[in-house]
Amino acid sequence: MDDLTQFLRARLDEDDAAARAASWDEWDSAHWHAHHRAQYDGCWAIIDAADDGVITTVDPRASADPGVAAHIARHDPARALSEVEAKRQMVKLHACAAGHECSTLDRHGEIDHCTWVMDSEACTTLRLLALPYADHPDYRDDWRP
């Protein structure tokens, strides 16, 4: 397994652990939504599917409360776990030691369809999957697509 594949698997494991730590089960507490407490104090809260308060008050200083609350709820643990699983499957498909066929970007940024990629570190798909983690100390600049 090469460095890029190891890096991606480690980040996905971290994302998985964080999502699981943010919910007490895989059902009701993993699905969040924003709730406006208009009659109580006018603030926004994040509640789970069991109507338990996950974040009892969303109080951002630089943004509108509804937008921040909706963003937090949209990226709930259930969605994070689904994204982790989908990305794990993509890594599995593209991290083949024998090589694989994949569209890549050439040196001009143009799509080169159906290229045979022998080294998964040269695979544009894996490089793109790693890009959101570019601020991680283990990310290497030569992985940039």
Image (cartoon, rainbow, N blue to C red):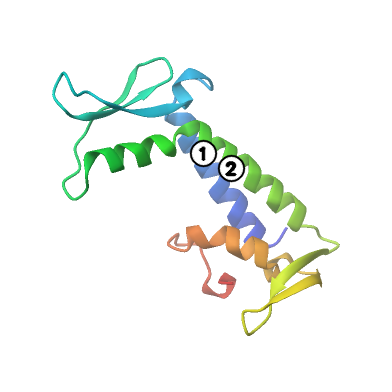
Does 12 sit above or below residue 3?
A: above
Q: CA distance from mark 1 to mark 2?
A: 6 Å
Quadrant containing the C terminus in the rendered view: bottom right
| Residue located beneath label 2 in the image | 84
Q: Please report the residue visible at 66 percent of the width from the left and 62 percent of the height from the top.
A: 125
- Residue 128 in percent (x, y) is at 59, 63
- Picture quadrant where residue 101 is located: bottom right
- Mark drawn on residue 110: none
- Residue 31 in percent (x, y) is at 46, 26
**Image side of residue 7 versus residue 65, left or right:** right
Q: Secondary structure at mark 2?
A: helix
Closer to the camera in the image, 37 or 83 = 37
Residue type indicated by callout 1: Ala
- Residue 29 in percent (x, y) is at 44, 21
- Mark drawn on residue 80: 1
Residue type indicated by callout 2: Val
Residue that extends furthest to the bottom in the rendered view of this protein: 108
How many residues crowd around disc 2 within 10 Å: few (fewer than 14), some, or many (20 or more)? many
Asked whether the beta carbons under mark 1 and mark 2 sit within 8 Å of each other, the answer is yes
Does 21 sit above or below residue 87?
A: above
